[in-house]
Amino acid sequence: MSRAARRPPAERRAELATTARDLALAEGLASVTLRSVAGRAGVTPALVAHYHPVMDQLVASAFTAVVGAELAEVDALLASADGPVDRLAALLRTLLDGTRDDVTLVWVEAWALGRRNEALAEAVREQMDAWQTLILSIVDEGVDAGAFHADDPAQAAWQLLGMIDGLNAQALVRWGAGGDRGPVLARAVEGMLALPRGTLDAALES
């Protein structure tokens, strides 16, 4: 391997973190190893170890970079929707249409790898809290507007997040509803939030 060009330490550290993020998104979180990051960046493993001496933390930062970017993207998308029903439909549409399966793989691997990587486990908990907060804001808005009914909005948000995660994880192995994840979940969510049957189906098609 040719000698890597010298760069300021902060720039090199950031470059390697970005490489780890890109690797996680392209090949899954389990692919973020010392050698794979070095190979993708065109540097030696020793250089990666110099700037990121704790590999567990680099894996955790790669996870956070991938899923944090998705959360920001979805948050911006929902901001343009008109009212809680449309926001909920937009959430289901964008998370269940199969276009984010690369991020789903990162999530699934993070849940498994986090059992032995506490830095990753902490990052997973933080990002799940952030997603629950986003979904809760939609549920709270709908309850306040009289569009939804939920005795415990926080619990409803957790339940919805779990159903989304479960359907997407199943779809990675092409089991279950496949490309029809949105409509399948819409009917369950309508029941959970006391919406008239077909409300979300109509919004998903708009």
Image (cartoon, helix red, strand yellow):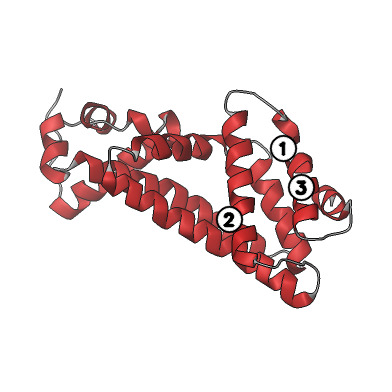
Q: Which residue corresponds to mark 2?
A: 158
Q: How many discs appear?
A: 3
Circle 3 — which element?
A: helix
Quarter holding the N terminus?
Answer: top left
Cα separation, mark 2 vs mark 1, equals 18 Å
Q: Nearer the viewer, residue 25 or 128?
A: 128
Residue at 59% across / 51% down in the picture? 161
Dot placed on the residue nearer the N-terminal end, 2 or 1: 2
Q: Position of residue 15 (x, y in %)?
A: 26, 45
Dot placed on the residue nearer the N-terminal end, 3 or 1: 1
Would you say the residues marked 3 and 1 are in contact, meaning their CB atoms lie under 8 Å apart? no
Residue 175, located in which quarter of the rendered image? Answer: top right
Residue type beneath disc 1: Arg
Residue lying farthest to the front in this orientation: 151
Cα separation, mark 3 vs mark 1, equals 11 Å
190 sits to left or right of 165: right
Q: Which residue corresponds to mark 1?
A: 181
Q: Which residue corresponds to mark 3?
A: 188
Residue type beneath disc 2: Trp
